Image (spheres, helix red, strand yellow):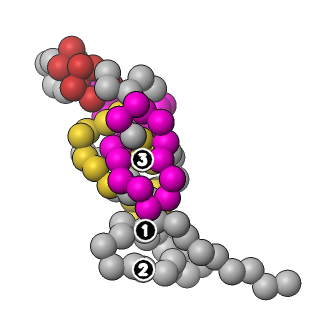
Amino acid sequence: MGWAIAGNPTGIEMMPVKAGSSTKPIPGYQVEILDELGEPVKPNQQGFVALKRPLPPSCLPTVWRNHDRFETGYLSQFPGYYVSGDGGYLMKMVTCSSW
């Protein structure tokens, strides 16, 4: 069981869609892109996709019957983050407001 980490959830209206983008993090997740030292990178720079902990309830709690593997494989690279090894980048979003 699980749910999306990023998407375009509908509410009042759909958000703009850009090809290749998964749109926005779903509420409850703080998605960050980290460099090799675990520091956040600027928009449009590639790095490790990381989920800042704590994660939403019951989200990615362990590897069945092997919690040590879960900790060493997903939680040890950058303390305070869940990292699966995926790479990516956050796009700089331009927004407009009217007065």
SS of the residue under disc 2 = loop
Depth check, mark 3 against mark 1: the one in front is: 3
User: Bounds of the magenta span?
Assistant: 36-62
Which percent across, then down, holds residue 66?
15, 18
Q: Is residue 20 left or right of residue 18?
A: left
Circle 1 Cα neighbour tier, 10 Å, few/some/many (<14 / 14–19 / ≥20): some
SS assignment for the magenta stretch, majority:
loop
- Judging by the rendered image, the residue that carries numbered circle 2 is 17
Check the image and report above or below for 92 versus 89.
below
Residue at the extreme left of the image, as rendered: 65
Residue at the extreme bottom of the image, as rendered: 98
The answer to if 57 sits in the magenta stretch is yes
Question: Can you tell which quarter of the image residue 4 is in?
Answer: bottom left
**Tag 1: residue type?**
Thr
Which percent across, then down, holds residue 13?
55, 81
- Judging by the rendered image, the residue that carries numbered circle 1 is 23
- Judging by the rendered image, the residue that carries numbered circle 3 is 33
Check the image and report above or below for 14 versus 56.
below
Q: Residue at x 42, y 47 (%)?
A: 33
The residues tagged by marks 3 and 2 sit, at their Cα atoms, a distance apart of: 20 Å
Q: Are marks 2 and 1 in contact (CB under 8 Å)?
A: yes
Q: Are marks 3 and 1 in contact (CB under 8 Å)?
A: no
SS of the residue under disc 3 = strand
